[in-house]
Image: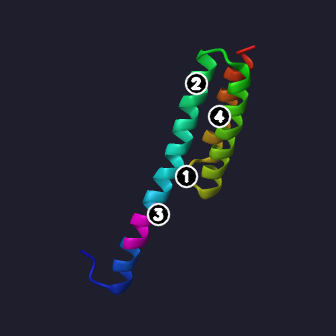
C-alpha cells in the first residue's frame, strides 16, 4: 500500500484510467468482430458501415496512445482489404 497522499491518489486515478482504456480497446475489438461477421456474410453495405466505425474507434485509441500508429495503420489496411474483397 502506498504511504504518501499523492501515491494514494495516483493509485485511484490509475484504476479509473485503466477502466476507461479497457472500454476503448474493447470497443475496437467488438467492432472488428462485427466487421468480420459482415464480411463472412458477404454483406457489402453493412461491411462498409462497420468499417467506418472500426476506423473511427482505432483512430480514437491511437490518439489516446492505447494503440501505436503502425499497428493502427496495419489493422486499418487489413480491414479495408477484406472489405474490398467482398464485392
Q: Earlier in the sequence, mark 2 or mark 4?
A: 2
Quarter assignment of residue 63: bottom right
Q: Residues within 10 Å of mark 4 (few under 14, many from 20)?
A: few
For label 3, the SS is helix
Q: Residue furthest bottom?
A: 5
* Residue with the mark numbered 3: 17
The image position of residue 41, as x and y in percent, is 61, 15
Do callouts 1 and 4 mark residues in contact (Cβ within 8 Å)?
no
Q: Earlier in the sequence, mark 1 or mark 3?
A: 3
* Residue with the mark numbered 4: 74
Q: Residues within 10 Å of mark 2 (few under 14, many from 20)?
A: some
Q: Nearer the viewer, mark 2 or mark 1?
A: 2
* Residue with the mark numbered 1: 66
Compared across the picture, whether 13 is left or right of 27 comes to left
For label 4, the SS is helix
Do callouts 1 and 3 mark residues in contact (Cβ within 8 Å)?
no
Q: Nearer the viewer, mark 2 or mark 4?
A: 2
Do callouts 3 and 4 mark residues in contact (Cβ within 8 Å)?
no
Q: Earlier in the sequence, mark 2 or mark 1?
A: 2
Query: How far apart in space, not on screen, are marks 2 and 1 (Cα)?
Result: 22 Å
Specify start and end residues of the magenta stretch as a single range: 12-17
Residue 19 drawn above or below residue 47: below
- Give me the residue at 63% from left, 20% from top: 39
Amino acid at each position: 500500500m502506498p504511504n504518501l497522499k499523492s501515491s494514494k491518489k495516483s493509485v485511484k486515478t490509475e484504476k479509473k484510467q485503466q477502466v476507461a482504456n479497457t472500454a476503448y480497446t474493447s470497443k475496437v475489438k467488438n467492432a472488428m468482430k462485427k466487421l468480420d461477421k459482415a464480411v463472412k456474410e458477404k454483406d457489402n453495405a453493412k461491411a462498409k458501415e462497420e468499417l467506418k466505425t472500426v476506423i473511427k474507434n482505432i483512430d480514437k485509441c491511437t490518439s489516446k496512445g492505447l494503440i501505436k500508429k503502425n499497428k493502427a495503420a496495419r489493422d486499418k489496411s487489413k480491414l479495408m482489404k477484406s472489405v474490398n474483397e467482398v464485392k
